[in-house]
Amino acid sequence: MADPPIFTLFCTPIIVLSLLHLSSAADTLSSVQSIREGETLVSPSRKFELGFFSPGSSKNSFLGIWFVASPETVVWVANRNSPLTDSNGTLEISNEGELVLQNAVAQLLDSGNLVLGERNSSDSTDYSWQSFDYPSDTILVGMIFGWNFRTGVEHYLTSWRSLDDPSPGEYTGRYKIDGLPRLEIVCNGSVKVYRSAPWNGVNLNDMSKVSNPVAKSFFVHNKTAAYYAIETLALLLKSGSTKWNMILSLPYDPCDSYGYCGANGICRVNQSPRCLCLQGFMPKLQVEWDMLNTAGGCIRKVPLNCSRGEGFMKLSQVKLPDLVDFQLFKNMSLKECKVECLKNCSCMAYANSDIRGPGCLLWFGNLIDIKEIDIVGYDQYLFLRLPASELDSLRSLSKKLVAITVASAISGLLIVGMALSIIWKRRMKSRGLPSGMDDIDLPLYDFATVAVATNHFSQTNKLGAGGFGSVYKGSLSTGQVAVKRLSKYSGQGPDEFMNEVLLIARLQHRNLVGLVGCCVEREERMLIYEYMPNKSLDYFIFDHDRRCSLAWKRRFEIVLGIARGLLYLHRDSKLQVIHRDLKTSNILLDNDMSPKISDFGLARIFQGDDTEEETRRIVGTYGYMSPEYAFDGKFSVKSDVFSFGVLLLETISSKRNRGFQHPDHHHTLLGHAWLLWSEGRAMELIDESICASFIESQAKRCIQVGLLCVQKFPEDRPTMSSVVFMLANEGPTLPLPKEPGFFVERSSGSSDAYFVKEESNTHNVVTVTLPEGR
């Protein structure tokens, strides 16, 4: 973009005797005045300042506008492509050129806008030029980001080349209006970094969740303009403070990174695995997906061929795909849109382009950049085309589930049927359960009640997120609760939901999280737990500052409580339960910092004399899986013992097993602990923040028990009854541990000690931790 022609910048000193130099307190510059280095214009309320500056370590000089309260925050630069090479710059109003003003004056407004107009003009908006028409890298209140159709001018942003160089850099932000309006950020002119959802007639829906107490965004679409802008709601000033807080950063989360999950994949915010293939699709390169590299995207399991029986699957709460290969019909109804898509064998999906009325979007080829949108009341849908065989499979599954539900309700024999029957009967009755099922008494809450309790699932109430959904803090008449809202895009959700309802409702122990109730309404499935105000164990031990608040005595009590909870599951409960996903993030802490084992979505019940089972569907979390389960799919109570051993060593060291790094070797935390033990330096494993408080004999016993639990072969590992006994008693001599599982050095560039093919990797499913960017 050319520099504004109305200003003249000089690289050499100018001495014009007839010019009057400017007072630093002035907000205007007349045609007989000039600004030199060190002199500035200041807006009337002293919000903005204009003058010459040299950014960072640069020796060049630029004319710019910055905040008075924060001079390092430059919001506009006049000569981005024409720096002055010395500090002798001068600014004056030129009367040369096409436009000549007889009594010209430039004024810096409190909005940060530099305008040029006639002196003593009665109209404050009557000006011939304004800096707001030439934005740099910043949007200010009153500035538009988009198009002025009357002038044909596009207002867009370009990043600085570097902190020392304000010339246009690699990134450009534009308000695109081809097809449907949307925001885009591109690198080097063509590589997309971020794009918003397309305009739906009301807003850019995936940005509507972004709000703050200082400013709000709004969009204008009419015959004269199409743009994005912001308006101020409040301004809080703190004397002496020049600190700036981030309000919005795009990409907002990893799922905002363009094409994060590749073609035909969907990205799930704050969940793991983050990427899934759409229904009817499979990874294009399974090996890469197993290694968490999803950029290759997904391909159809069965090609489309326009055969009879093809139809559509409705996806709710998703960001519509990018408008790459598409067609837009502004006056077509949703039903007509469906018919139009079925006519073309290349049509992959359709959607309503305007939620207020008619409008049809059709996509052809791959569907790019789809993500879930967690906004209550979001009512735009994507209809994904599927072959007849895929639809038949879905219908068959649906019929099977219905048949199971009806049969179970009648017979009362199947476990899942009992859980479904409870939920169904709760819909019919406001209290109590049918006769014969009093041992699984669980209140049922309707969706409206839970929504109100969680402030409509607001971000401020969000406690965490994981593989099967998000967790929100809520308040019911019975007190505070934590609501786990299952994601609609998890293929495992229904099974895990029923599993958890059954298990937690039947299991009662002081070290297991309590289930308060549940909610099943249409597509919604929610579990309501007792609220744990102190979040989870990983929230403390893996944080540099918070770990100091957990002294040795508290950590030992937490570990012992977890061991007793596992012992109850394995031996003392009515059902012998294998948890299968024991980890620090699934250990919640109550008011008294007592541990509660949570997340029974992956748990399995052992029947009769069963001691081991085998599965092809390996689920769990990297770093906590036992070798026999990770490689062969075999699990037993000894699998949980291994996970407990990892958790124990992590708790006393404040180090994660997965991703552990050491300058002298490339082992995991387990390998590091084994090396220290073998060399007689086991006490070096203890977290340095608790070195002053730990009891040496107790700490050494914990390390030894932890190593016994993570031994390579399950038959070598102790039972949980032995673990509790060894931890609680100092007298007995403990057996010596053997080499731990996964005692293999990694390459220097790897963060994992082993490779596991994992269909469902959970992370913080129920844990009430604050979400952190990854």
Image (cartoon, grey):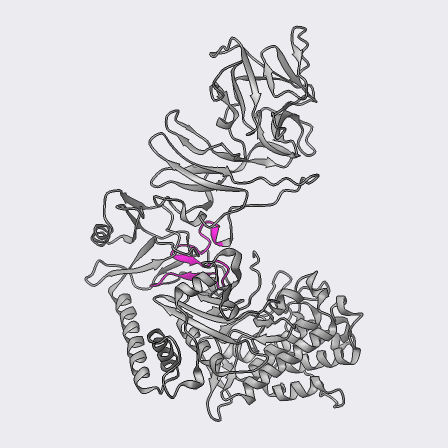
Residue 191, horizontal then vertical, whole percent: 46, 43
Residue 496 position in % (x across, y down): 44, 74
Image coords of residue 182 (percent x, y): 40, 42
Quarter of the picture holding the C terminus: bottom right
Q: Is residue 158 above or below residue 249?
A: above
Considering depth in this image, is 657 or 376 the residue closer to the camera?
Answer: 376
Is residue 267 rendered magenta in the image? yes
Relative to 675, 305 lies left or right? left
Q: Residue at x 23, y 59 (%)?
A: 305
Magenta stretch, main secondary structure, is loop
Q: On the rendered structure, is 721 left or right of 451? A: right
Residue visible at 27% across and 52% down?
347
Residue at point 35% right, 63% down?
279
Which x, y percent locates residue 565? 59, 82
Q: Residue extending furthest front?
A: 477
- Towards the viewer: 457 or 601: 457
On the question of residue 427 being in view, the answer is yes
Q: Is residue 549 above or below residue 639?
A: above
Q: Quadrant of residue 283?
A: bottom left
At 28% from the left edge and 43% from the top edge, which residue is drawn? 328
Residues in magenta, as a range: 255-281
Quarter of the figure with residue 324: top left
